[in-house]
Amino acid sequence: MVTHVATLTVVVVNYNTRALLDRCLNTVMLSAREFGPDTDIWVVDNASRDGSVEMVREKYPTVRVVASAVNRGFGGGANLVIRLTRSLYVLIMNPDTEAIADAPAALVRFAKENPRAGIVGGRLSYPDGRFQHSCFRFPDLAMSVIDTFPLSGRLVESPMNGRYPRRWYRYPFEVDHPLGAVMLARRSCLDRIGGFDESFFMYSEEIDLSWRARAAGFQVWYTPTAAFAHHSGAATAQFRGPMRVALRRSRGQFFDKHYGQSFRVADRMIAAVGLVRGVIRDVRDVRNGCLTAAEFAERRDAYRWLARL
């Protein structure tokens, strides 16, 4: 069912982040005024229990709310609005982001100027203004090693870990994929590739979307003209252990879907070595009093889930 045809649809997928969602919507409402009535703003709430839905309906009556009775994940939540609307562009945002100036309009302007761009990401910074990587290369085995084992900060910031040089961020450039916290998608691209793959409940859904967009002949770009503040990890910090498991599951799922079997076997071997190393380290830290029993129990549960994966 088509409810309204607009140039831009903004969809924020929320789960128990009422205060952050409030700040996000406030900035989006201000920055989207350039489009006026040609902008739809939606919130998909994934069964929050913190009054998020009531807050939106009370403070932002023009924002359309989809209150899901179950947590559909980020991609599943975004797909609800993607299917309900026919706007030329869809801006998908996390509730822990804030638009700066006319950032949504800047993304649309860039997409209009670059008709082959199926997905566009903007410039991200931490709330205090510090630089934040907003685009990445597709994951590989080197990234799996760096994710699994604590290495030097230089390697974490290097191309080996999928990072683009910071100096590149001063200008637009083509990327493998943007961070899913903020990404604009062209409607024709979404129609061609079918939106998000909902089997990715949390993490890697934006990587999969960009992979399929590029495979379908679209380009994926970054532009510095659209700036957003990002409280990185604020939403998922509620469940650090489960989110670690979800990250590993989704990354493995992405590898299974798009990479060869030998790659996936090698990745699982890296994960297995890292799992054993983590258990040994945590047992030692408990004995030395550096880790509490409660902390160890939480990590132990995560290790069990990781071992099953």
Image (cartoon, helix red, strand yellow):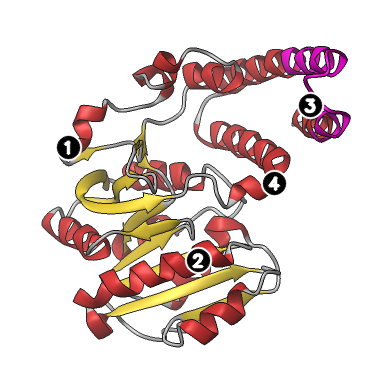
Q: Earlier in the sequence, mark 3 or mark 4?
A: 4
Q: Which of marks 1 and 4 is nearer the N terminus?
A: 1
* Amino acid at pointer 1: Arg
State the residue in front, 207 or 180.
180
Q: Earlier in the sequence, mark 1 or mark 2?
A: 2
* Amino acid at pointer 3: Ala
On the image, the x and y values in percent for residue 89 come to 29, 66
| Image point (23%, 38%), residue name | 174
Residue at the spot of label 3: 307
Label 1 to label 2: alpha-carbon separation: 29 Å
Name the element at disc 1: helix
* Residue 239, label in figure: 4
Characterize the local packing of mark 2: few (<14), some (14-19) or many (20 or more) Cα atoms within 10 angstroms.
Answer: many
Residue at the spot of label 1: 170
Relative to 198, is 292 on the left or the right? right
Residue at the spot of label 2: 21
State the residue in front, 188 or 40.
40
* Amino acid at pointer 4: Phe
* Residue 274, label in figure: none
Query: Is residue 164 visible to the viewer in this orientation of the structure?
Result: yes
Image position of 1 with respect to 146: above or below:
below
The stretch of residues the image draws in magenta is 276-298
Label 1 to label 4: alpha-carbon separation: 34 Å
Image position of 100 with respect to 301: above or below:
below
Q: Can you tell which of label 3 and label 4 is closer to the viewer?
A: 4
| Image point (80%, 32%), residue name | 295
Characterize the local packing of mark 4: few (<14), some (14-19) or many (20 or more) Cα atoms within 10 angstroms.
Answer: few
* Amino acid at pointer 2: Leu
Q: Is residue 23 magenta?
A: no
Q: Is residue 289 magenta?
A: yes
